[in-house]
Each structure stands twice: as structure tokens, then as C-alpha cells.
Amino acid sequence: MSSLSRELVFLILQFLDEEKFKETVHKLEQESGFFFNMKHFEDQVQAGEWDEVERYLCGFTKVEDNRYSMKIFFEIRKQKYLEALDRQDRAKAVEILVKDLKVFSSFNEDLFKEITQLLTLDNFRQNEQLSKYGDTKSARNIMLIELKKLIEANPLFRDKLAFPAFKSSRLRTLINQSLNWQHQLCKNPRPNPDIKTLFTDHSCNPTANGSRPPPTNNPLVGPIPKAGAFPPIGAHGPFQPVVSPSPSAIAGWMSTTNPSLPPPAVAAAPPGLVQPSSTAAFLKHPRTPTGVTGMDYQSADSEHLIKRIRTGPSEEVSFSAVMHSNAYSQDDIPKTVLRTLSQGSNVMSMDFHPQQQTILLVGTNVGEISLWEVGSRERLVHKLFKVWDIQAASMPLQSALLNDAAISVNRCVWGPDGLMLGVAFSKHIVQLYTYNPTGEMRQHMEIDAHVGGVNDIAFAHPNKQLCVITCGDDKLIKVWDAVAGRRLYTFEGHEAPVYSVCPHYKENIQFIFSTAIDGKIKAWLYDCLGSRVDYDAPGLWCTMMAYSADGTRLFSCGTSKEGESHLVEWNESEGAIKRTYSGFRKRSLGVVQFDTTRNRFLAAGDEFQIKFWDMDSTTMLTAVDADGGLPASPRLRFNKEGSLLAVTTNENGIKILANNDGIRLIRMLEGRAMDKNRGPSEPTNSKPLIVNALGPVANVSSAVGPTLERSNIIPPAVSISGLSPVENSRLVDVKPRISDDIDKIKSWKIPDIGDPSLLKPLRLPDSGTAAKVVRLMYTNNGLTLLALTANAVHKLWKWHRSDRNPSGKATAYVTPQLWQPPNGTLMTNDINDSKPPEESAACIALSKNDSYVMSASGGKVSLFNMMTFKVMTTFMPPPPAATFLAFHPQDNNIVAIGMEDSTIQIYNVRVDEVKTKLKGHQTRITGLAFSQTLNVLVSSGADAQMSGHMRMDCIRNEVIRSKVGVAPIEDKLCMWSIDGWEKKKTRFIQAPVGWQSPLSGETKVQFHNDQTHLLVTHESQIGVYDGKLECLRSWYPKDALAAPISSAIYSCDGLMVYVAFCDGAIGVLDADNIRLRCRIAPSAYMPSGALSSNPVYPMVVAAHPSDPNQIALGMTDGTVHVVEPSDIELKWGGTPSQDNGPLPSNSSNPSLSGQASEHPSR
């Protein structure tokens, strides 16, 4: 339900309470789930109305929602049960036990048995734990204290325990205001109108003489009743009727500091324009539901009012409309790629000069700023990051730079006249430069602006004074004197880091929109009276706002954490969504960026394309891929005239697209430059070639004057880079093209490998019975490959030393031998007679010295000698069967064995003894991984329940068990200390968008080489977790790799992640940021016959222990393939493409301090 609908429910709740409809009030509370009335809940509990208590609770939560909810229902039902026993009503107690308490037995059977045994006692107080139970009233009061704590801690009740603070009788007040406004629309308003119904709009009948009496200011609905008792509503003062606004005051909404008073008149708009809908109205009216426009009176009355407030001739207005409908075509959209620029590092922000249409300002993730002349492809200025005066820097900044010298440009933007530019950095500071038309850029001012990252910067002219507006991680917006550097204003009110700012003006009213990463939109006047608006942006995450170039239309673009993108136009007069533009993929792969141009077109980067819309149509106009090479969510930026468009590429490049005007502009520049080259005697500092368009483009050689300043800066991870769409400046993040030198590097740049000639695949020989390969691993020395098939048979391939393979290690260039002892013995696992091995969970583990292997296929665990294939011993007969095996990193005699019954047994092979049994999962164990650095064991189960690592309500099982007496729902990931085998952490896996929750299926875990980062693999996703089991990065199947994941593994160097999919494709991802390097199609390594038959895909992927570019694939048809690049010097993929989805945390910026999981990747 939208924000406005939610507020309407609160108004109705208040009205019902004031009118004493008590039962209806609580029914609406329960059905809407918006407000949990704690007072009503307490009354019902103290009265013992248990059915009503549970009915009311069910409007907000269910037993199975989370641990807090489970505890709440358990306490209520336990109390009901004890009261029945106390009344000696055994029949009722048995009924409660069977119907209400039985549900908890699956979580703690022992507790349920203990509760059942209370029936056998004459007085349940004979039970030691219940010996202090008093009378019913005191017991209920004690329980209420506990229930209130649980409800307040339960995230499902967050923001539902406090009734919004607004004046009483607010609904009546709004009706009065509406009727007053309707009365103003009357052509012949009567001084004392007779209001008989609310079902139709009010309209006065004409008076006898047809004259128009003065408007009335009296309320139309009668007296306002006294304030009701609905908590915690404040007192309601006398109703102030709406005063008819004068025509010139319609746009003057922001000129008063008291929004409740009628605004004073302001200067009229320029002739020829319709008086714009006041942005003050946008700041004063609540937002309507997404996709619903504001009220539009299609009547003669409304037309009459519109005519009254027009300040310019209608002919000019109609001319504007004609221009909008006929003057533009798709040919005006820049779609032709003319230039590719190579920046050398990841571009974070860029902005075209407001006058010199081919000068592009660029900021990068290593703190560099550059000026490019895109026509000549020449870099005019290049400055590395440096703190200008480190002695004057604040201690927090010095400390941040000392701890991590990496710093990124979050935003760079030109001033409105192009004579100044500002740069916002990821740590604390803003730097301002002056720029002159000769191309010289000089240091002007350095401001230590915010604690943490400065996420956005913009220029504005409040009170005819050039100012710089900044926002940051410290949740503040600040306004600075751009000349003297003096701080003029500080705006507080956001509850999350501020993502972007958008200063604007209408008439003589200056204001600022701001957005935060919690999805809140606020608006500020240049005063100290706080925000005038608090709206929820569509998507409730990263949103940027921008006006059309003429300042008459407001747009926003945002992406939710789930990847849903929203591009909308706002109806400012109503604070409503006027239109929502369609055409985005269901789940955008990153935060979508957008821009506007020519007061006509919108553009956004999505799905490896640039998508365009006509502002007046919600349907996508067209999309271009810029000849390929774009990231999933490319950043983009128009020049002021809309003839050029800068777009980011995958390879740290910027592509410049042009329309016909842009092409002529660039060609003219080239022609002038050629003419200049023919006349070497012409003075170097000649006047600009194209006045007011190109600036001194022919003088670029003399413009590269500033000395480059170098410092050792490590590129940080992508952090927030603000978008501040002021009138002539919008954000675009760009990446330069690959230079000729880079093209010479022998590294694949092909995103999709479908031709066998591009890699070296080898199908391993196999004369045995074909059966699905369920486990596959290289031996630690890299000389041998071991497979376990679904029929419980092991297969071993050995490579031998030869002239072609002097190292004797596994390679796709030499065919190995399927090795068996001379006696023909097969390594075959014990099987379960009652369950075929194909239906059993298979597991395998190899000792560090490669001398023996432990394995199971539903029967007993077998220990094999790798040289003789003989069974050394068997142990642990089912049930339960072993499902996963892992050797202790410090002792080959200790092995962790995951079991089918959800336990983990720590087994000593030498003494044939189970040392301890770990309990924490509820389904079979599917993954185990040891970390010697962290001194822990991490386990995973087959039931991927919902979102433990995203919730704040995760508490330890022991605490729940001690408080509730009931075990919690399945712990998806568990971390155990190796020393004492106690459980340290539990986490759940979040279901991605489009997947049913809770998840099911196997989840595997593997530690990175650093022994601190954990790779978690499920068919719906892969994720990288830290040593505290917090998810740092995640990746979901999408686009060409949309099939479910069957297996994933780190490369031996830890730099890549190989992912196998159920359609046969292989993805090679960069391990650092989980971004795609390349896709290997099934056709590249499988023969065409396999592709045409039943679907064949890798069940498991194995990584070579010393060659990071070699993998082995165990297939569903029983074959095994070894795959590596076709040349030993080549590697999989080039620079990773930016196509990963929204990340819970993808920033190494220390300034984010605790907000990492909330910050998007820009």
C-alpha cells in the first residue's frame, strides 16, 4: 500500500476513535496492520480474551514469522494452558495442548513432553520451574511485561507501535479545506453556501443578478468536535479555513516559514509561460500512491480557474505544446558512437561544461580529475588527488587518510557559468577549482565538509550569492559560500546517509531537494526551520532527482535494494507521481542512472543499453547498445544542447554518442583543427573556434599546463557518488575505451565464449559405466583428478610426465590415463540396501598428503588407500547417513562429518570414536569448511530459510532455548569454534527476487585462500561472507547466465570464482567484486551431439590447485571435461564487467562506518 493510502488509514482510525466506534477501530488496526494498539492488547490480555488476543496479533505476525513471534505466541498459549490447569479444567487444558501448543513440539520435543507432564500433577506448581506462579492476575501482568519487550524488539512491529502525531479531527479538517477549495471554483459563489452532501463536488447555483459575491472564509462542515482520546494525538487548535489564493501567489508556496498560513504574493512569471504549479505545493501535500496522478478537475470550473491564474498569453502556451508534440524526432537522440576515450581508471562522475559543449569533466575512483576535449580526444588537464593543506585538515580526515590512503571522486560538477568546478571525495573533503576559457584550472578552495564521504555536490544561487551545496555520510546537507568558503546553513533531519541533492528555484523561491539511502525525500528552504517534506521515494533506496532544462518538470530515478528501478515524473502541485515510465528489466543489475535533455527526452542506463523515453509517454522510445561493451547499468550524461551523450563502458572507457547536430559539431571541430594545422604561423592562443559552443578547442596543447601531482593511492571499491541534478548539471559515471596498447595485451576481452577454438577443452577417457558425476576434485599436487559417480564408484585420472607435459600436472593439452590397479579393483563405496545410491547424498574428502580418501554414498563411510584402492576401514553405518566430509586442517585423523539427521559429528579416525556431536541445523548437512585463521568450522544445511544475515533480530539459539524453551527455525549457516566446538554464529540465506521463500536445496561453503572470506553457493545465488558471517557481496543468475547454479568454486589464487549452471554454461567471475569476466557457452567445450540430446550440464566444477585458469567439469551424463584457455599465456576474461546486482556491501570506504550494508554501488 502506498504512503498516502497508509496515511488515509490513520486518518480513518482517528475519526473512528473520535466517533467512539471502538470495535471498528481495532478491527481496522488488525486488518490494515499499520498500527498495533498496545493499550488494547494489554486490556485483552488482562481480561483473558485469548481468542481476541491471537486474532489481533495475527494481523501483524504469525507464529512462524520469526523467533520473537514464536516466543510471543508460545507465552500466550502457555499462560492459557496454565490457567486451564489452575481451574482444574483438564479437558480444556488437553484441547489447548493439542491444538495450540503442539505446533512447538517440532522445535523442542522435550519441552512439549514436560508441558504435557503437567497434566499428571494435582497442582502444576509442584513443578520446580513453576513453583513461584502466583494468581492469574499477577501472572498475566508478569507475562505482559515480557510480551511488551518481545513486541518492541520484533522487527515486524517496527514503526507500528506509535500512532503518528497530527492534530485531532484531521479528516474533518481536510474535508473543510476541500469544500472551501471547491467553493473557490464556483463561478458564482454564495456567501453562505448550503452543504448537503459530500458524495458530489460542491457547486453554488448562480445568484439572481449573476454577480460574484466575495468568497467566504467560514468552515463548511460545522464545528470541529473536541479531541478524542486516540494516542498520542496532540491538541487541536481552532480550524483555520483556507483563504482563496491570489493568482500571483499560486507559485509562492515557499516564501513563508509557516506552511499553514497563506503564502504572500511573488513576482509573476515571465510573459508567455503558464504560472507553474508551485513546488511549495509539492512540499506541502502528501504524496499520492505511486502511479496515481493528482486530481485533475476536467470541468468548466477548473478551466475558469486556470484562465484566472495565467499570466501570459495563451498563444505562447499553445506554441510550447506544439513544440513538444511536433518539433522532435528520434533522430534528435544521440545514438551514433563518435569517440571512445581511455581514462585509465574507473570513472565515477562526469559533467559537460555548460558553455563549451565538448569539454568533459571526469572524476575517477582513485581521486583523479581530468578535463577532456571530446572532439579532439585530448586530455587537457589531469590532476591526481592530493590534500592541499594536510596541516589544516581535521583529525578525522588525517586519521582516515592514515588508515587508508585510497580515495575516490564521488561527484564532480561544473558551476552554472562554467568558471568554477567542484569535486566531492569519498573522505570528508570538497575541492573547488577555477577555470578560464584558455583551459587553465587553478586551485580555489578546499573544504573539510563532512565526517565520512561527501556523496554529492551542487552549485546554487540563493540570495544572488554563488553557493556550494554538499551532502554526506553524516546525514547532513551543508551550504557553503563558494567564494569565501564560509558555511552558511546546515540542514539536519535525514536518518541515513544523504545520497544526492537537487537545488532549484521557482520564481524567487530557492529550495533544495535531498534524498537519502533509506528512500526518504526531503525539501529545504534556505533557513533553519527544518525540512518541509518527508516523502518515500519509489523503491525506498537510492534515488536521484532532476529537473528538465527549463526547470518546469521534475523527475526522479531510483533503484530498490531488490533491483526494481523506478523512473517517474512528479506532479509538484500535488506531490504525486504524475507518470511512471516502463521498460526496465525486472531486476536491474545496479543502481540505474538517468539524465534529461532538450526538455523532451529522458535517458537511463539499464540492461547493457541506453534506454530513451519521450517525457510525455511512459512507453520506452528506443534503446541502443552503443556498439556493445557497456556495463549492465551504464552511467550517462548529456551535454547542455543534447547533441552529445557520454556513456560508461566496461573497460574504464567513455563512449561519446552524437546525433546529427553533434556529428556536425565534431566534424566542424576536426575541420577547424586541420585548418589550424595547415597554418603553423598562426598564434597559439587564438580565439575560440566556435563562439559559445566549442570554446578554445584548438588550443588544447597549451591548456595542459598544470603540473601533475602524484601520490600512491590504491583504488578503493566503488562507493556512493552523489547525483545532484541542478538545472544544468547531472551525474554520469563513465569508463574510458581500451587504448591501442591495451589491445595488445594477450588477455581475452570476449564476454561470451561459444567457439571451441577460443579455449582448450578435453573430454577425459572413460571405459567404465557412465553415471552422473556427483563429486569431483583435483589431488593437492595437481597431478590427478578424482571423481565420484552416482553409482558409488570412484574414477581416477593421472597425467604422466612427457615431452609435451614435463611437469606431469593436469592439463587439457595432454590426455591422461584412467588409472586402476593391476588387479582391476574399483574404489566403490558401501551403499544402503534400502536406498539406491543415486538417491543418496554422496560426499568425499581428500587428506592433505593425497594418500587416502574418505567417501560415502548413502552407506557406511569408507576410507580408501589412494595407491591401492583398497578399503582401509568403514565406519558410521546408517541411519543417519553421512552427507558431507571435511578433514581437520591440523590433524588428518580428525574429520567433521555432516549427517542426514542435521547433526555434525567430530570423528577421530585413529581411535574410531566420535569426539563430539554438534546440533544447530534442522536438515541434512550439505557443506562444511574449516578456517585455520579464524579457528572455526562453518556448516551449511539443505533448507535455506529466510534472511538471517539481513535481519537485526538474529539471536543465538541458546538464548532462544533458554527463554522460550523452543528451538528456532533452521540456521542456514553455522559457525563453530574448533577449540571447544561451541556455536559462535548463525546466519540465514536471503531469498533473491523471484525465488520462493524459504529457499530449499543444497548450500555449499568454501573458504578463500585468505581463510577469512567464505564463498556460499546455492542454486539461487553465490555470496561472499566475512569472518562474522556477514554477507559482503552477492550475485544472482541473470541474463545469459539465468539458469540455476549447480556448483561454484574459487580459483586456486582466489582471484576468480568459477560458476557452473544447469544449462551447461560456465561463468567466470571476479572474486573481489563478484562481477562477470566472461561466459563459457556449452558449445565451447561439449560436442554438438551432447547438446542436441537430453540436457547435459556440470553437476560439479573443480579448480586446479596450482593453475588458476584450469577447471574440471563433472557432467550429468557421466563425462568429465578439463577446460582451459587455448594459449597458456591467456587468462579467462579481461576487466570484469559491471553487471552484478545490488550488493549488501560493496565498499571499502572506511567513512561509511557501519553503513556499508546500506550503501549502493554507484
Image (tube, grey):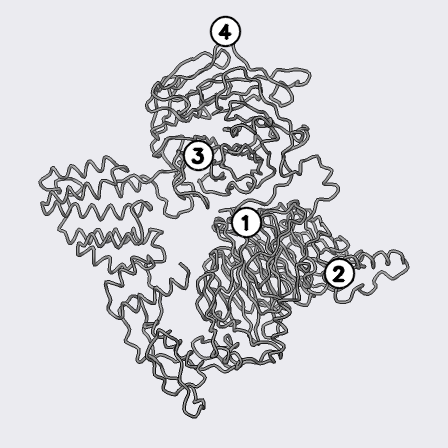
Crowd class of label 3 (few under 14; some 14 to 19; many from 20; radius 10 Å): many
Q: Position of residue 129 (x, y in %)?
A: 18, 41
Q: Position of residue 678 (x, y in %)?
A: 89, 56
Q: Is residue 906 visible?
A: yes
Q: Residue at x 49, y 43 (%)?
A: 1032
For marks 3 and 2 on the same chain, the one whose residue lies earlier in the sequence: 2
Q: Which residue is mark 1?
A: 590
Question: Is there a contact, CB below 8 Å, between mark 1 and mark 4?
Answer: no
Q: Which residue is mark 4?
A: 823
Q: Which residue is mark 3?
A: 1003
Label 1 and label 4: CA atoms lie apart by: 58 Å
Left or right: where does residue 346 sit relative to residue 295? right
Left or right: where does residue 655 sit relative to residue 398? right
Numbered badge on residue 319: none
Q: Position of residue 1111 (x, y in %)?
A: 57, 28
Q: Which residue is mark 2?
A: 439
Quadrant of the rendered image containing residue 97: top left
> Marks 2 and 4: which is nearer the front?
4
For marks 1 and 2 on the same chain, the one whose residue lies earlier in the sequence: 2
Determine the secondary structure under disc 2. Answer: loop
How many discs mark residues in the rendered view?
Answer: 4
Quadrant holding the N terminus: bottom left
